[in-house]
Amino acid sequence: MVAEQTKSGAKSLAANVLTDVHFWVPVAVLIGGLLLLRLVS
Amino acid sequence: MRSTSPDSDASQSPGIARARSLQILGILSGFTAGAWLGAAEAPTKLVTIGISPVVISLVMVVGVFLARWSLPALILGTSSVRADVQRAPHLIVWAVLAGCMWATANTLTIFAIREIGLSIAFPLWNSNSLLGIFWGFLFFNELRQAGWRRWSGVLGGALAMCIGAAILAAATTSQSSNAHSMNGVWAALGAGALWGTMYIPYRKAYLTGMNPLSFITFFTFGELGMMAILAIGYTGFGPLRQQLFNARGVLFWLMLGGFIWVIGDLFQQYAAKYIGISRGIPLSNTNQLWGLLWGILVFGELQGRANITYWQVIGGSLLMALGAGAIALSSANRDERSRWKEAAQREGERYGVSSDYVQARMDGRQAASEAAPRRSASDWILVAGATAILLGFASIARVPEFSFHRAPALALTAAVLVLLGITGLRLWRTTRFQ
């Protein structure tokens, strides 16, 4: 039961993070930064 | 300890006094952050003596990693970090993501310094404050219901900073003989974009109640992981090991730079927590002035340049600093702070964090349900381990062979230590480092 609750909590945490725009904006900027680094190095 | 709302009707006067005290603390933290972040850039001058920028960044991050674990263990103990993570586990994701951004931005700044010099690259990546203001407004209700005076201060300041950055960019293209100078400009601006966006995770963490000391502890996994990937990817494992071995005499100085950076960053985190990112970032961006002081007084960066370049760099930097000052002086009023609380409530509801805990932490206190933080034997082992590693590298360090002026370096070092003492003491007295 505890294991099920933990699994459910982890799933809802992941769902909350992945549907949060605050997560995707930094991810997009990070990808852009890595591409820029490749260009200037 | 009881959690109180600064603006509640029942305790309005103490609440307003507390809010004012936290605002002053945030402003002090911002200025102290600027001084220490500026000082931390000085070791990157080693890039001119033939060490790969990626290796410099990696070694700095190793110093950062040591500091980000040992300082929280020393100040509050890791039990406080564990308790924070149990309350808001989602923040680990944001902390690691922010760490990845920091490492990428830091590597870009090393390239920028190599191409266009510290005193010019510095203000360019400090354009991150404009992005920080934008994200703060868009996502976290900063500057909402702030009134025309505060809006004017922030927008006027932002405009002044843009003009200052443009003047500095013009100085770059006219004074640099390096064919890759535009690469340096793009690298510095890219670092600014990464650092400006990195404040989204910062603000998110502090609106949800996390202690800055806990945040940086997980942040550093992103930093070190990303930096290790970049270093191995760009250099290769074998050549990287060889470069590290060849550079063993200067590794300590770079790690020390990383360590100093963490102290600055920690104050920046407290500034972001208590005055928001739209004000905290410009204040900590006064590091451009400290960077200029180190560059000009200690490393003689502008010697032999044409007068026009000199005036462009000084004028552009001062204009940016004035803009940052105007933004910083437009402090949040009660209506705006109530909008911050709405954003905090939204975050708490989304991620299931107790509202008592969020409210108390926003007010710089512990929640009633929290146990007092205490240090354990493992904390002292962490501190001793980090110290031993630094001392080990110090024992094989040599003074890098480049010219610098000793007296200004000592004066600037004394100044940053005084700021550390004043702000550290006030942080302890007001919030017990919460």
Image: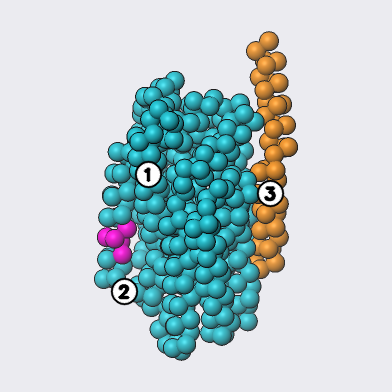
Chain colours: A orange, B cyan
Residue ID for mark 2:
B405
Q: Say which quadrant the N terminus of chain B sits in.
A: top left
- Quarter of the image for residue B395 reads bottom left
- Magenta part mainly helix, strand or loop? helix
**Crowding near the residue tagged with mark 3, few <14, some 14–19, many ≥20 C-alpha atoms within 10 Å:** some
Name the foreground residue: B278 vs B245: B278
User: Which residue position is annotated with label 3?
Assistant: A25
Give the vertical position of B280 relative to B408 (above or below). above
Which stretch appears magenta?
B412-416
Residue ID for mark 1: B20
Which type of secondary structure does the marked residue at label 3 adopt? helix
Residue sitting nearer the eye, B183 or B163: B163
- Residue B187: quarter of image: bottom right
Given the image, on which type of amino acid does mark 2 rest?
His
Please report whichever mark, 2 or 1, sits nearer to the chain's N-terminal start.
Answer: 1
- Give the answer, above or below, for where B331 lies relative to B370: below
